[in-house]
Image: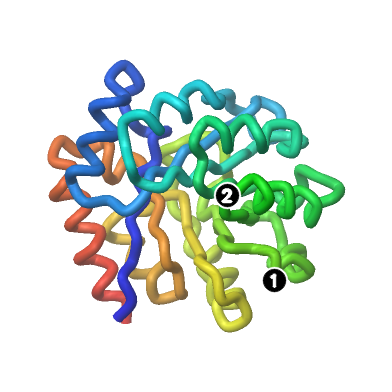
């Protein structure tokens, strides 16, 4: 059985003690740190920028998985890479020259990803599959944490898995109850916010997700 990677989403962390929060989940055994960047235009929420990514970079050696939910992300690829992003994921709707931006990400030294919102078709990614290291399937409407898992999104993962050799990640409503559905569909990475940062014992929360992912059949 392949190892399922766990990526705590700092959107659900306590930002007043963010450094401690990141160190805690790293010590608890997660595999990477997921950072959501929102501009208030592409999605209806405003979050962090490169300065926070840089601050997180200083306190962990784990890969930083930066999800840019912003318009024209090409303007900021260099900044987020300089801040410490190891993986940079954009949305197909956010740029006219998607392939050009993916090349920009690769040229910066980062791994490149595309994300699928619930209303975005799998077919929209087809021209770019060979350019991608990661596909991020949103199982909620992006913008805010704590939403309910949308099980219909697992069909997208099932459709992508046979034709995509890279990593597939899922984000939105992931917890021990929904993780098995995602793993059964074919994901490699479980992004979880409140299911980890909303618990007092982060090691136990991560262990519960790992255990749940073993019961996907």
Disc 2 is placed on an element classified as: loop
Judge the density around disc 1: few (<14), some (14-19), many (≥20) Cα neighbours within 10 Å.
few
Q: In this view, does 84 lie above or below 189?
A: above
The mark lying in front, picked from 2 and 1, is 2
Judge the density around disc 2: few (<14), some (14-19), many (≥20) Cα neighbours within 10 Å.
many
Image quarter where the N terminus lies is bottom left
Residue 200 located left or right of residue 142: left
Percent coordinates x, y for residue 119 in the rendering: 68, 55
Q: Mark 1 points at which residue?
A: 130
The residue positioned 73% from the left and 54% from the top of the image is 103
The residue positioned 45% from the left and 74% from the top of the image is 186
The residue positioned 21% from the left and 51% from the top of the image is 29
| The image quarter in which residue 209 lies | bottom left
Residue 150 located left or right of residue 94: left
Disc 1 is placed on an element classified as: helix
Q: Residue 139 carries which label?
A: none
| The image quarter in which residue 64 lies | top left
Tell which of 58 and 99 is nearer to you: 58
In the picture as drawn, the residue positioned furthest to the right comes out as: 96
Tell which of 15 and 57 is nearer to you: 57
Q: Mark 2 points at which residue?
A: 110
């Amino acid at each position: 059985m392949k190892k399922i990677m766990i990526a705590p989403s700092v959107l659900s962390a306590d930002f007043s003690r963010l450094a401690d929060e990141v160190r805690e989940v790293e010590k608890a055994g997660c595999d990477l740190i997921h950072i959501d960047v929102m501009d208030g235009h592409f999605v209806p929420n405003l979050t962090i920028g490169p300065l926070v990514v840089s601050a997180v970079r200083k306190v962990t050696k784990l890969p930083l998985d930066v999800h840019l939910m912003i318009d024209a992300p090409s303007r900021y690829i260099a900044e987020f890479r300089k801040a410490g992003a190891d993986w940079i994921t954009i949305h197909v709707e956010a740029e006219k020259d998607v392939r050009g931006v993916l090349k920009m990400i690769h040229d910066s030294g980062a791994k490149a990803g595309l994300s699928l919102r619930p209303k975005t078709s799998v077919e929209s990614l087809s021209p770019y599959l060979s350019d991608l290291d990661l596909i991020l399937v949103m199982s909620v409407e992006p913008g805010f944490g704590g939403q309910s898992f949308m099980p219909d999104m697992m069909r997208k993962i099932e459709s992508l898995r046979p034709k995509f050799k890279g990593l597939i990640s899922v984000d939105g409503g992931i917890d021990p109850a929904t993780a098995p559905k995602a793993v059964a569909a074919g994901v490699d990475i479980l992004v979880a916010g409140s299911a980890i940062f909303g618990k007092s014992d982060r090691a136990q929360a991560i262990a519960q997700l790992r255990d749940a992912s073993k019961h996907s059949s």
